[in-house]
Amino acid sequence: MIESVIETHQLSRSFGSLKAVDGLNLLIGNEIFGLLGPNGSGKTTTVLMLTTLLKPTSGTATVCGYSCFKQQMQVREKISYVPQDMAVDIKLTGRENVWFFAKMYGVTRPKDRVDEVLGILELSDRADDIVRTYSGGMRRRLELAQALVHEPEVLFLDEPTIGLDVSARRNIWEHITRLKKNGMTVFVTTHYMDEADHACNRVAIIDKGQIVAINTPEYLKHAFAQDIISIRISGNYHPIEENIFSYLGNDGDTILLSAEDGLNQLPEIRKKLETAGNTIREISLRSASLDDVFLKLITNRSEPDGFNGHKFRTMLRRRG
Ligand SMILES: Nc1ncnc2c1ncn2[C@@H]1O[C@H](COP(=O)(O)OP(=O)(O)OP(=O)(O)O)[C@@H](O)[C@H]1O
Ligand SMILES: [Mg+2]
């Protein structure tokens, strides 16, 4: 039984006729909880409602036992929120940015606390430099420092690592994991499945405002995804009948299939593909990742032609 930190019942939000969030039921305890979903699936809308910044169309939500819509002040005392878009003032120094938040929250002994959070986020050396001179990773760490200055119980992070390089991303996740170890509950949205897989205790996959799967990353990998066969072909893909495998999508000229017992089915799949007129350049087998679970769930719901991984990644890069 999870002891509730965040709880929602049929939480919904529409914009005109669009159901951005549609009947969300969540029970989140003291954990790192990841909300994963494609662009426009309702992640930010959910976070805005849980952080009291947006009213729902219907349904309820509580954080630390307080209603997000009737007891906003009590909720705000318990939480912090780092939005998807950069929220630091680049004309000020790092220390001044954090100081502003400390004063805003009425933190006691602000000077000590500002020094402390700058230290935790490894920004002490550069704290008195203008933020304009910071890298993307440092700015994101500064936002975390701002969010932590009043010692929240629950931290909401919307896409904390988007646009950062691999090592800056890893660094942010190390900080997030450390916060959880010290007792904080973290609700995080991300596009990066591998990061969610490593860091989150549980994840929910949201699509078109609805949860399509929710569990630990390990469980989801076992339950939804099987062995993954990737096949690089020359020319167009000539589809074959899907009886012993299912088609996940394509990433450029590579076709992704999932199969129950990939190793034993590989020869037959290869034969069928070649008989159908496909020219195979390369074929490989691996066990499923959270990425595959995501592709499978989202593909089955939304794109009859399969999910175009290449298109998806290009879109993400543009956002960065
Ligand atoms: N203020 C608004 N007015 C109208 N439509 C909105 C508004 N905010 C969000 N939407 C729509 O609601 C849907 C969900 O948007 P939301 O920002 O929650 O998605 P998201 O999952 O955070 O996407 P992304 O991964 O791109 O950040 C989208 O179709 C979006 O266009
Ligand atoms: Mg968003």
Image (tube, rainbow, N blue to C red):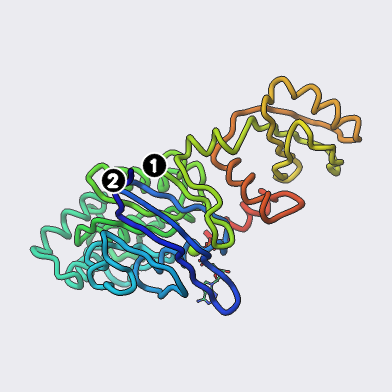
- Tally the numbered discs: 2
Per the image, the residue denoted by label 2 is 180
Q: Nearer the observer, disc 2 or disc 1?
A: 1
Q: Which of 241 and 158 is in front in this view?
A: 241
Q: Residue visible at 71% across and 54% down?
A: 303
User: Do the residues bearing badges 2 and 1 touch, measured as CB atoms within 8 Å?
Assistant: yes
- Packing grade of label 1 (10 A; few <14, some 14-19, many >=20) is some
Residue 302 horizontal/vertical position (percent): 68, 56
Q: Residue visible at 55% across and 33% down?
A: 222
Q: Residue visible at 11% across and 62% down?
A: 111
Q: Does the residue labelled 1 lie within 8 Å of ligand 1?
A: no
Residues at marks 2 and 1, CA–CA distance in whole angstroms: 10 Å
Element class at badge 2: helix
Element class at badge 1: loop
Residue 109 horizontal/vertical position (percent): 8, 63
Q: Nearer the viewer, residue 232 or 206?
A: 206
Q: Residue 201 carries which label?
A: 1
**Residue furthest to the top:** 264
Residue 155 horizontal/vertical position (percent): 31, 57
Q: Residue visible at 39% across and 57% down?
A: 135
Residue type at mark 2 is Lys
Mark 2 / mark 1, whichever is N-terminal:
2
Q: Which mark is residue 226?
A: none
Q: Nearer the viewer, residue 205 or 163?
A: 205
